[in-house]
Image: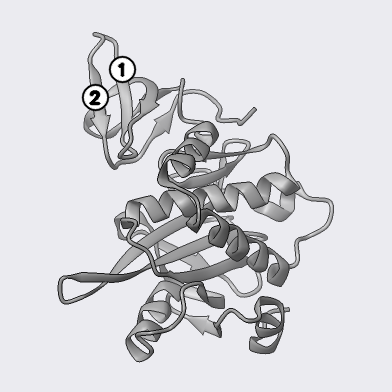
Amino acid sequence: MLSQETLQEILRPRPVRYFASTESTNTEAIKWLAELPLIASGAVVVADEQTAGRGRYDRKWLTPPGSAIAMSMILRTKRPAQNVTILGAVAVSQVLEALLPGRVGIKWPNDVMIEGKKVCGILAEAVWHHEKMTAVVLGIGINLSVDFSGVMLPYTPTNLNEHLDTPVQRPQLIKNIAATIDQWMEEPTEALHQAWKTRLVTLRQQVTMERGVTGEAVDVDKDGALLVKTSDGKIERFLAGDVNSAAPQTNG
């Protein structure tokens, strides 16, 4: 059961704010920063229900009550938001791998997958004061027991609890994710990039990208761009975009 008291107890001494319902935990985290500009890095916002969560390309990420993890972390960092997005994907993957060894991967650039189905979405947003970036807010949404019947999505979703014998306890999962993010915040960019690359189930797959480009995803570069080799041998570089894979996505 989520509550302010439960989360404060398990996340102590990390600052935490809990909402039974809110539009977006990222929005609440940005408001919190405006109220307390010196709040410590690692502060967490959690909601039981999220009615207008944001994903990439302004897609909505809804969190029905009691069915998912909806959390945002305030991170003091000089890393660009794209790098923090990758960090979030790696951290969530690492935590889920402990529950489902060999069954978790990342679809480029940041969708966490279980056996080819999306279980987690991540959105990092930079917060600026004048021309200085003061923090990055890292939003994480994990499906636990969402009812997707009748819902049209541009991907195939799944729920974490469907793959487990015993449903996860949300406070403990939030704690594990926050602690793993803390750990990766201390690691150099090169180590993070390698951990991300080794988890990418998109590589070595035939993919279709925006503009109708089709080819094999052969690598990612230091900026996180996906390199796609087309049938004529040309390498196309994508810094953003959706990936449609022609083959099942697995990890290991």
Q: Position of residue 113 (x, y in %)?
A: 57, 43
Q: Which residue is mark 1?
A: 229
Question: Looking at the picture, how far across and down is residue 235, in whole percent?
Answer: 25, 19
Where, quadrant-wise, is the C terminus in this rendering?
top right
Identify which residue is drawn at 47% across, 44% down. Answer: 192
How many badges with numbers are in the image? 2
The quadrant in which residue 128 appears is: bottom left
Identify the residue shown where x is 69% and y is 34%: 102
Residue 248, how many percent across, how many down?
A: 56, 27
Q: Position of residue 147 (x, y in %)?
A: 62, 60
For residue 211, say whether it is visible.
yes
Answer yes or no: do the residues labelled 2 and 1 have beta carbons within 8 Å?
yes
Quadrant in which residue 222 is drawn: top left
Q: For the residue carrying disc 2, how many other residues have a C-alpha within 10 Å: few (<14), some (14-19), or many (20+)?
A: some
Query: In the depicted view, which residue is nearer to us: 214 or 204?
Result: 204
Residue shown at 40% from the left, 42% from the top: 109
The single residue placed furthest to the top in the displayed view is 232
Residue 236 image label: 2
Mark 1 residue element? strand
Residue type of the residue flagged with mark 2: Glu
Disc 1 residue type? Lys
Q: Is residue 144 left or right of residue 86?
A: right
Is 209 displayed left or right of 158 in the figure? left
Quadrant of the drawing holding the N terminus:
bottom right
The residue lying toward the viewer, choosing from 155 and 133, is: 133
Q: Is residue 147 visible?
A: no
